[in-house]
Image: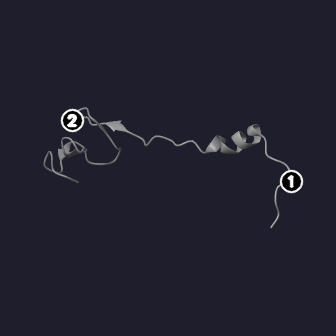
Amino acid sequence: MANPKRRHSKARRDRRRAHDALTRPASSTCPECGEVKLPHRVCPHCGHYRGREVIEAGEEL
């Protein structure tokens, strides 16, 4: 197995890790209750999707 001859600098290490940051999941607000929810999904707080009630409010998904 080959071993590194010289140690990588901190700058080189950090340049490699520049793309490793996590991104937050997208979110939107429910037009019925105003709570934050995932886009294109039923609102877990009020049970509405696209202007109509899909599930009972408070029901687990």
Q: Quadrant of residue 10?
A: top right
Residue occupied by mark 1: 5
Q: Position of residue 13 (x, y in %)?
A: 72, 43
Residue occupied by mark 2: 32
Lower sequence index among marks 1 and 2: 1
Instruction: Quadrant for the C terminus, please.
Output: bottom left
**Which residue is at the far top?**
34
Say which of 42 and 8 sits in front.
Answer: 8
Question: Vertically, is 55 above or below 29?
Answer: below
- Helix, strand, or loop for circle 1? loop
**Which residue is at the far right?**
5
Q: Quadrant of residue 50?
A: top left
Q: Quadrant of residue 11?
A: top right
Q: Amino acid at mark 2?
A: Glu
What residue is drawn where x is 65% and y is 40%?
18
What residue is drawn where x is 78% and y is 41%?
9
- The disc placed on residue 27 is none
Alpha-carbon neighbours of circle 2 within 10 Å: few (<14), some, or many (≥20)?
Answer: some
